[in-house]
Image (tube, rainbow, N blue to C red):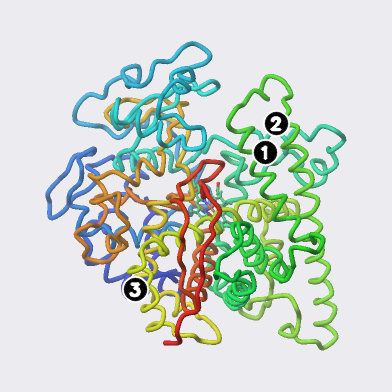
Amino acid sequence: MRAWRLLAKRSVMTSVSGGAPWGLNAADLLQNILRVPHYHHYIRHVSQCQTIQEEPHCSNNDKVIPPGDPCSVHDTHYLEAYNLMEENADMIFEPENMLKERSYDGEAVPEDSSLPMPASMIPGPRAWPIVGCLPYMLGHKAFDPQRVYLFWEAVRQEFGPTFRKDMPGHSCLVFISRPEDLESLFRSTMYDPVRPGMTSLKKIRSEGGADGHTHIHDTIFRGRAGILAEQGEEWWRVRRRVQRPLTDATIIHSYLPQMDQVAMEFVERIRYLRDEKDEMPESFNTELHKWALESLGTITLERRLGCLQEDASTLPSRPLRLVVLVKQLLGALHHTENLKLWQYFPTTSIKRLQEAHQVFTDVALEAIRDTERLLATRGRSASSSVTASSCPLHHHQKGDETSSFLETLLRIPGLSREDVLTFLLDMIFTGIDTTSHAVGNMLYLLARNPQEQQKVQQEIDKMVGRPRHLTPDHLAALTYTKAVFRETLRMMPVSIGIVRRLNRDTILGGYRIPAGWEVVAPTLLMNQQEAVFPRAGEFLPERFLRGSSLAPRHHFSFLPFSYGPRMCIGRRIAYQEIFCLIVRILSELNVDYKYEDIHLINRLSYGPSHPLRFTFTDRMKP
Ligand code: HEM
């Protein structure tokens, strides 16, 4: 209890000292905590979860609403509560010894007033031994392996918001789609969030590879698989140590000039790539991947890589190989995570994954070593009178210390060099697809909605103009653009869903789901419910503006970066990169798209179904 009080207090203090870069400033934050009864209650609620006195989970003016209720009181305060959750998520979940903090013995699941039904009563498609409901799924008219969300939606229509869908290797799999159930899921798993999946990555990293690839595993991974694939103590050991630098606004903002420079160069690249009809080539998706690596490289590799300078005709350089290798690795992981026959015998898919992982790791590590060499040179130069600012590597200043992101990570007590390298590898391979797809989807939706595009451009012209350098204040002022970004992630999300393995019995959708079962909250199912998002099928960024009558009906209904201690650790980087690029593109260019509709196809994350053959025309100077 005392720890949580300290945390709540610290969350306010951290924001006061500049920790809240997006939207709310410190004064807003304090004002909101005082003014918004719901959020005030929320902090209290989180604190009380510490002592497991589950109470009715929302209240307003003494009106008590039982858990599971549609929670209409959230309507008005949705955005305030949501913003505050987003801003303070890191601070709220930061107790050092989180995993040890509580014993689960004897803990009650959130008690409902009515008796929960047993899990055996959860409805769902017919399942057979071993194959589960695979035959049902394959024979279903809505089943499309590339758009599996269509099938999930059909199942939800037939069986309701909570359904069971046993699959081979996943015999106890429950799908939820009500935001209040997602809230219960997060609360139940908050102190030990196990995200099943990435088991093939864990296997090859911790057991060593076949075909003489063991040297990497001996020298880098040493039986540890990194935060993407690890669980429990080992995941938390790394996560809690890298949390601060990844979410420290000062550190992330210090990379804004470099990311902005990359964005400006990408606008030039668009001009260079345009054909006579001002259209992008079919390979524009890959161009966005290059931008994403170049932009992410400013922080993870501390330098410019040159991805945007290359001509297609030249031999691929190491950075461009990295783009290709990340794609191959994600593709291979998609296969091994989809069908886990490799658990029983060595399949071609796991061998492919080993190969792809091996080559990616070699190339990425070499790039990191180049950075280390440059940093070492800088150290020597600094001592022989060359100032840090003249160094090609980026650096930021904290007190008297000047350090790069890599040096900051390497100095964290309790993290070995191998931990840091593994973490950087994970950042590189998670941070490329995600941001490039989000930007591509946002440009697509704006191309299809010219009025909204115009509003974004007007906001950019008014609040930012065309400055030589973007500042954090410029980006924070873009309220409408931020609403468009959120609406993009609602309609065309990047993440397929939140998945957790329960570590205690939990009531979801009125059923008592036993510990050990896995629960999936599929993003598209959550984001497209009329009852939660009025006029869900329409692109309406206004719903994310303050005071909108279209606001989502529950504060756990829209969490594109997830929530809690396991939420996306790269989200501040993602925001910054994406906003730099959108601002620089739309302040100079109009975007249009003249081909067939794009929908999402599922791999490890959602990606576009067609090439992004945008048309970019120059805007008149405002
Ligand atoms: C629009 C862009 C992005 C979206 C929508 C997104 C979304 C997500 C989501 C939903 C999760 C799962 C969280 C959970 O299980 O609760 C996640 C995890 C993660 N993301 Fe992101 N992400 C984005 C960009 C990035 C970037 C740019 C990076 C790296 C720089 C990154 C690194 C990670 C890592 C390392 C994890 C695993 C965290 C852990 O397990 O502790 N993401 N992301």
Point out residue 356 in the picture as x, y percentages from the top left corner. 74, 42
Instruction: Pick whichever, 542 or 285, lies toward us.
Output: 285
The front one of 360 and 91 is 360
In the drawing, does residue 420 fall left or right of residue 164? right
Q: Which residue is mark 2?
A: 349
Q: Circle 2: is it few (<14), some (14-19), or many (20+) Cα within 10 Å?
A: many
Q: Amino acid at mark 2?
A: Ser
Question: Between tags 3 and 2, which lies in front?
Answer: 3
Give the label on residue 567, or none: none
Locate the C terminus and report the quarter of the image it occupies: bottom left
Residue 169 against residue 200 in the figure, above or below: above
CA gap between label 1 and label 2 equals: 7 Å
What amino acid is found at the position of numbered circle 1 in the picture?
Ala
Q: How many marks?
A: 3
Quarter location, residue 178: top left
On the image, the x and y values in percent for residue 420 come to: 70, 55
For label 1, the residue is: 332
Residue 147 coordinates in the image, percent (x, y): 47, 37
Outermost residue toward the front?
276
Q: Nearer the viewer, residue 188 or 536?
A: 536
Residue 245 is left or right of residue 350, and the answer is left
- Identity, as a three-letter code, of the amino acid under mark 3: Lys
Q: Earlier in the sequence, mark 1 or mark 2?
A: 1
